[in-house]
């Protein structure tokens, strides 16, 4: 067994670490004992508790011979999309927004890898190495599938929960009023729509017609907007309509409001 520590944050997330250094108003958490260990800086005031835990000793990680290529990642995404019934294009849009396809990305909050999994979330999903593309993408896709099922295929709510946590979506009855979250939802949906429209130009006219109809019947509440459905992987062989653009527009407007 190996002794580790887990820092519990005010936002409910936790970060598992090997050791830490105290800086001015900041605590640096190191992920392992190696001199070249990755780390994340967390405001000390955000840490509410530290727990000592014992975890099984991990087997030595295989040495990577080369960085994953775009083709490798594309194959992994396609496989994960089929396995978890999510359009691979949607997964690609999430990865682009999360890490811009950098498998070694670590956010200031401690999220790791291509789909930026928090250590606690990765642990619950059974992800052994969040920096290994196949493991990370499978875990992220499985988590997205759970969220899409939870919100009946509503992509905006699922993305908001992926970004801010399901408890925040439940708390606010939809996309929470956080600028970062609204910007994130809009970014993913717009990127996904651009991809689908580029693949199927004939959908542009249909999208414009749908958008016009939605504007003419739009209510004062955005809750009445059409559900944003993500096509399942097995359906993507035929032309699929993009996610209703009002989902991205509403998120983008909220993101720029003071």
Image: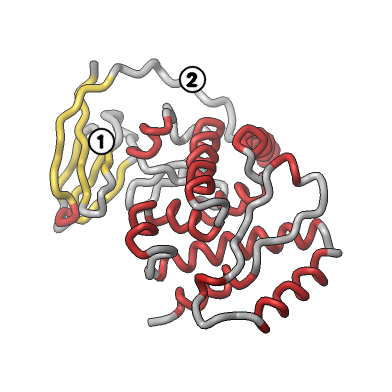
Which element is circle 1 on?
strand
Q: Foreground: 184 or 251? A: 251
How far, Cα to Cα, is label 2 from label 1? 21 Å
Residue 49, quarter of the rendered image = top left
Residue 198 appears left or right of 1: right
Is residue 162 among the parts visible in the rendering? yes
At which x and y percent is residue 122? 40, 36
Q: Nearer the viewer, residue 258 or 233?
A: 233
Q: Residue at x 81, y 64 (%)?
A: 203
In the figure, 241 relative to 68: above or below?
below
Whether 158 is drawn above or below 144: the answer is: below
Residue lying at 57% horizontally and 52% vertically, measured from the top left: 153
Per the rendering, the mark at residue 62 is 2
Nearer to us: label 2 or label 1:
1
Task: Answer with mark 2 or mark 1, whichever residue precedes in sequence.
Answer: 1
Q: Position of residue 237 (x, y in %)?
A: 81, 44
Q: How is the image coloured?
A: secondary structure
* Residue bearing the label numbered 1: 17
């Amino acid at each position: 067994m190996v002794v580790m520590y887990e820092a519990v944050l005010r936002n409910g997330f936790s970060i598992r670490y090997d050791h830490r250094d105290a800086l001015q108003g900041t605590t640096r958490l190191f992920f392992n004992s190696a001199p070249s260990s990755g780390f994340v800086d967390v405001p000390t005031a955000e840490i509410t508790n530290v727990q000592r835990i014992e975890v099984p000793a991990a087997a030595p990680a295989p040495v990577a011979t080369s960085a994953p290529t775009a083709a490798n990642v594309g194959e992994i995404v396609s496989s994960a999309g089929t396995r978890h019934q999510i359009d691979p294009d949607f997964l690609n849009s999430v990865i682009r927004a999360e890490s811009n396809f950098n498998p070694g990305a670590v956010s200031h909050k401690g999220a790791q890898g291509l789909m930026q999994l928090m250590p606690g979330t990765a642990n619950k999903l059974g992800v052994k190495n969040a920096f290994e593309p196949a493991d990370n993408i499978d875990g992220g896709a499985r988590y997205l599938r759970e969220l899409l099922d939870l919100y009946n295929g509503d992509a905006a709510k699922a993305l908001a929960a992926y970004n801010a946590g399901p408890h925040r979506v439940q708390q606010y009855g939809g996309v929470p009023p956080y600028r970062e979250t609204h910007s994130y939802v809009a970014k993913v949906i717009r990127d996904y729509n651009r991809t689908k429209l580029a693949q199927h130009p004939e959908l542009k006219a249909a999208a414009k017609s749908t958008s016009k109809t939605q504007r003419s019947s739009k209510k004062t509440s955005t809750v009445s907007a059409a559900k944003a459905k993500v096509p399942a992987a097995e359906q993507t062989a035929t032309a699929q309509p993009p996610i209703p653009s009002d989902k991205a527009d509403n998120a983008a407007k909220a993101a720029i409001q003071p």
